[in-house]
Amino acid sequence: MSPVRLPAGAVVEIAAPAKINLGLLVGPLRSDGFHEIFSPMLPVTLADLVTARPAPQGAGLAVECEIAPGGDNLAAGAVRELERRLERTFDVRLHIVKRVPAAAGLGGGSSDAAAALEAVERLFGLELPLRLRYEVAGAVGSDVPFFLWPGPQLAMGRGTVLKEIALPEPLHVVIALPGLAVATADAYRWFGESRGSRRTALAERRAFVERTQTLLAALGAARRPRDLSAVVANDLEEPVVARHPVIGELKDRLRGAGAFAAAMSGSGSSVFGLFARAASAQRALAALAPTPAVYVTDLQPRDVGAPRDRATPRQATAPHTRSTRRDAASRRGDHPAK
């Protein structure tokens, strides 16, 4: 395939939002080594910035990032996977400005990977099929497909089976950062050790299914933000807090500062609190000091079903919130993953 000639100064900038797991149920171990999960996830306004620019012909891929530069970055993995599937290479330079803390359960690296995939698609005018985009994302990491779609979603399977959900608005969220890193693999290993072999595989699966049905019913019954209290819970929290008590202390401080619900996000270490009003959330920030914390809002679009316009490479662009083109099926709420 002949190289694409891009206009001089072409650049694409995409905001890569963090996420929180409003709830996280962890089920049996799958044959692929991952646990089954059931998790309503919400993108929030804390975001990295991913910029893509063309590199000189033959230069290949370069990733600049203060946290994980070079080929070890998940964003690099997304581009490499796309190259493998398309049987071509991209001369592109990715620059990632990190604002989402790493190893905090906020999905920053996964969001960067999804943003890099879309940035390369935009920059080179690829118009990737929805299923290919999803498959590339899923090959890079379990959380990456979530970030290809706007708004809250229910993550199932190993996290790559996604269904759009509507949540009561508005949501005001404070995310507290204890200043320690928790590896996802460690969190799941501690979870497995804490459960031991108390149940048979069949009993464990039945119990998991019952709990998912209870959570789904709570989601469906939520009419006000406060109703989400019945959804907020994290199976990984107890074993992680046992090793890092400061996480549990932050959860208690958020509740004491007025949060109507609080939990650890994902595999940790961040902790979030949900507040009824923006003013309450802002007061909680002061109450948490000197612990670093950030106030964020949700990114749920007002018109969940409406497709968003795809930007094209141009001389200079302002930062975008990520937008992903959808076909008629996805506008009805159908994911390629379903």
Image: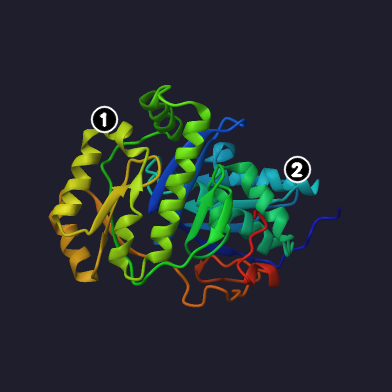
In the image, what residue occupies the spot 42% across and 58% down? Answer: 217
Towards the viewer: 34 or 223: 223
Disc with the residue nearer the chain's start (2 vs 1) = 2
Towards the viewer: 38 or 303: 38
Total marks drawn? 2
Towards the viewer: 122 or 256: 256
Q: Residue 32: where, in percent of width, then height?
A: 62, 32
| Label 1: how many Cα within 10 Å (few below 14, some 14–19, many 20+) | few
Towards the viewer: 283 or 335: 335
Q: Residue 283: where, in percent of width, then height?
A: 15, 63
> What residue sits right under mark 1 in the picture?
242
Task: Give the quadrant of residue 167.
Answer: bottom left
Relative to 329, does residue 37 appear above or below in the rendering? above
Labels 2 and 1 touching (C-beta < 8 A): no
| Label 2: how many Cα within 10 Å (few below 14, some 14–19, many 20+) | few
Q: Secondary structure at mark 2?
A: helix
Q: Residue 235: where, in percent of width, then height?
A: 37, 40
Relative to 14, does residue 246 appear above or below in the rendering? above
Q: Secondary structure at mark 1?
A: helix
The circle drawn on residue 31 is: none
What's the amino acid at mark 1? Ala
Residue 239 visible at all: yes
Residue 113 visible at all: no
In the image, what residue occupies the spot 25% across and 40% down? Answer: 247
Q: Residue 72: where, in percent of width, then height?
A: 56, 36
What's the amino acid at mark 2? Arg
In the image, what residue occupies the spot 40% across and 24% down? Answer: 198
Q: CA distance from mark 2 to mark 1?
A: 42 Å
> What residue sits right under mark 2 in the picture?
84
- Observer-side mark, 2 or 1, equals 1
